[in-house]
Image (spheres, rainbow, N blue to C red):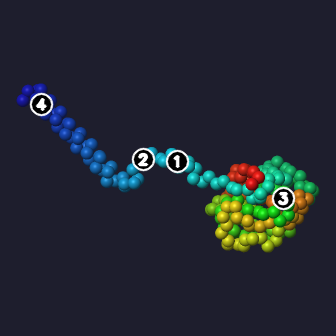
Amino acid sequence: MTNQQKNNVKLAIYGTLCAVLVLTIALIVAFTVPSGNKLTPQDPSEPVDNNAIVFTNPLDTTNVLMGYSATELQYNSTLNQWEAHKALCLGAEADANVYAVFGGVVESVENSYLMGTTITIKHNDTLKTVYSSLASEPNVKEGDTVTKGQVIGKVDSSAQAESALGSHLHFEVLKDGVKVDPADYLTLENK
Ligand SMILES: [Zn+2]
């Protein structure tokens, strides 16, 4: 064999090995990646953040009497003291409907002197909403499943801690047990 012939044989063997290798890899990929789970690009119509939660208004009207403040102190004229107000106080006429801002399960219906009739709704493992200063005997009880926008009770002035505000809804959002700004989930607008 001439050197040229030797080189041709080497190239042929090398080419065959390469082809076998490529086929083997192709077969391994074909059998290990389950069909339906091929590396297809993500559907662009799918939302990027699957956890995005948008609340509906808890009332038909939007009259903010006291906004949310995590650290900034606001004057509570009822208790005659300055305090952080980690909630939203929305004025409304007595007996105005109060709506669940999102679907969930009623965790508790309580009554306290300071915050009046209070409903707590659990939306998922981390998120809860709290509705205070409601009329007694609300429309839901502990364990009830509620849907977004469902009437859960009526506005009243039962929260003695905020009696100077008159009839209103005291609304809180709890994320992992911490009171957070309702504006993270809620854009207030008249219905
Ligand atoms: Zn309040």
Indicate whether 26 appears above or below 61: above
**Which one is closest to the eye, mark 1 or mark 4?**
1
Crowding around mark 1 (Cα neighbors within 10 Å: few <14, some 14 to 19, many 20+) is few
Q: Secondary structure at mark 2?
A: loop
Query: For mark 2, what is the residue?
Result: 40
The circle drawn on residue 92 is 3
Q: Secondary structure at mark 1?
A: loop
Circle nearer the N terminus (2, 3): 2
Task: Look at the numbered disc 3 and give the secondary structure of its residue.
Answer: loop
Residue of label 4: 6
Q: Residue at x 27, y 43 (%)?
A: 22
> Of label 2 and label 1, which has the lower sequence position?
2
Local crowd at mark 4 within 10 Å, few (<14), some, or many (≥20)?
Answer: few
The residue sitting at 10% across, 29% down in the picture is 5
Q: Quadrant of the N terminus?
A: top left
Distance between the Cα atoms at labels 4 and 3? 95 Å
